[in-house]
């Protein structure tokens, strides 16, 4: 369904020697495995505060564009998707194939995270999906990801 290609992104930090070792090793491994590897050095910058985190789990009869519908929901609420895991259970006997999706997202505004609950439940109802959502709001003054 997704084809023969994939993208893998690694964000690394560490000593100069450790980073240089990775930078010299990856091209060799890429050639060995016939992979295209692109590397770029960047500088660290503070992450913006993300006062709310949302976790959702969905089980629904599999059909095209379902994951797109859920990711669009998060995008429309200006939420950053941090993790998305999906798997499909093949059809068995009389039961259609099932799609299982787990999403973790962060919101720069706590009110967006609260507003998504109603929209998520409405989407689950529209798609005849079983879903759960958990929203956690953090204090604006808490330290997040080591950045004050």
Image: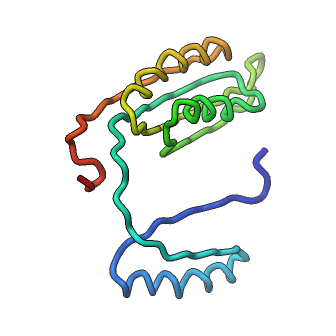
Front residue of 73/2: it is 73
Q: Is residue 132 left or right of residue 124?
A: left
Q: Height in image: 136 above or below 36?
A: above
Q: Position of residue 96 (x, y in %)?
A: 75, 21
Front residue of 148/92: it is 148
Q: Position of residue 110 (x, y in %)?
A: 36, 30
Location of residue 125 (image quadrant) = top right
Report the residue at 51% width, 65% height from top: 10
Report the residue at 61% width, 18% height from top: 123
Q: Height in image: 41 above or below 16?
A: above
Q: Is residue 90 left or right of residue 110?
A: right
Query: Which image quadrant: the N terminus?
Result: top right
Front residue of 120/102: it is 120
Q: Position of residue 17 (x, y in %)?
A: 37, 87
Report the residue at 58% width, 13% height from top: 122
Q: Position of residue 61 (x, y in %)?
A: 70, 22
């Amino acid at each position: 369904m997704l084809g023969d290609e994939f993208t893998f992104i690694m964000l690394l930090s560490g000593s100069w020697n450790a980073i240089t070792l990775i930078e010299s090793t990856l091209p060799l491994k890429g050639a060995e495995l016939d992979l295209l590897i692109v590397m770029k050095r960047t500088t660290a910058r503070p992450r913006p505060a993300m006062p709310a985190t949302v976790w959702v789990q969905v089980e629904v009869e599999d059909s095209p564009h379902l994951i797109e519908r859920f990711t669009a929901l998060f995008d429309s609420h200006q939420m950053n998707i941090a993790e998305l895991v999906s798997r499909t259970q093949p059809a068995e006997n009389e039961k259609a194939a099932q799609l299982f999706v787990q999403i973790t997202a962060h919101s720069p505004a706590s009110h967006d995270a609260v507003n998504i609950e109603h929209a998520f439940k409405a989407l689950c109802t529209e798609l005849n999906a079983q879903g759960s959502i958990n929203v956690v709001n953090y204090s604006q003054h808490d330290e997040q990801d080591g950045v004050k």
